[in-house]
Image: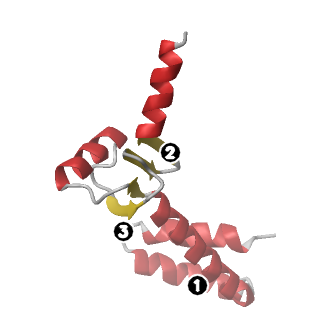
Amino acid sequence: MIHSRTLAQTALTLLEKPDAEKHIDAFLKYLQINNLSGILPQVIAHIERLESTTSKNETLHIYSKYELSEKEVNDIQSATGAQDAQVEQHIDDSLLGGFSATYKGHIYDGSLKSQVIRLKTMLTR
């Protein structure tokens, strides 16, 4: 049995190919021939979820106490390997200083609190 999630992933893969419109037309014809048109709403829902997840993971989210300068943002992008990523800055009043960032499921903690804890650990060894 073919699952709607598999069909959604297939459709997204076809969209990345040259002549995507031709491939999508063939994909829709396949659904019709195999009497799978009824699960098209679930396929669309999966595509929306997959696109949303991909977009969130590929955005660099930076959390800091204050608005960062363009140079600071560029430095964080370089440090995280997110030079070409879309950047979203968030103000987080709970941070004392420094920053925290997330990109592609990784957390980069450059907060002042984290740095003080690391220093304390190093000094008490």
Q: Give the side of residue 29 with respect to residue 19, left or right.
A: right
Determine the residue positioned at 26% across, 55% down.
Answer: 68
> Type of residue at label 1?
Leu
Question: Closer to the observer: label 1 or label 2?
Answer: 2
Of the numbered discs 3 and 2, the one sitting upstream in the chain is 3
Give the Cα distance between marks 1 and 2.
Answer: 37 Å
Q: Residue 19, position in %: x, y?
A: 37, 74
> In this orientation, which residue lies closer to the viewer: 67 or 43?
67
The residue indicated by pointer 1 is 28
Q: Residues within 10 Å of mark 2 (few under 14, many from 20)?
A: few
> Type of residue at label 2?
His
The residue indicated by pointer 3 is 18
Residue 119 sits above or below residue 39 on the image: above
Q: Residue 11, position in %: x, y?
A: 55, 73
Q: Residue 10, position in %: x, y?
A: 58, 68
Give the Cα distance between marks 3 and 2.
Answer: 32 Å
Determine the residue positioned at 27% across, 42% down.
Answer: 78
Residue 65 sits above or below residue 116 on the image: below
Give the quarter of the figure containing the N terminus: bottom right
> In this orientation, which residue lies closer to the viewer: 15 or 95?
95
Q: Quadrant of residue 28?
A: bottom right
Outermost residue, top side: 125
The residue indicated by pointer 2 is 106
Q: Residues within 10 Å of mark 1 (few under 14, many from 20)?
A: some
Determine the residue positioned at 43% across, 47% down.
Answer: 100
For residue 33, say whether it is visible. no
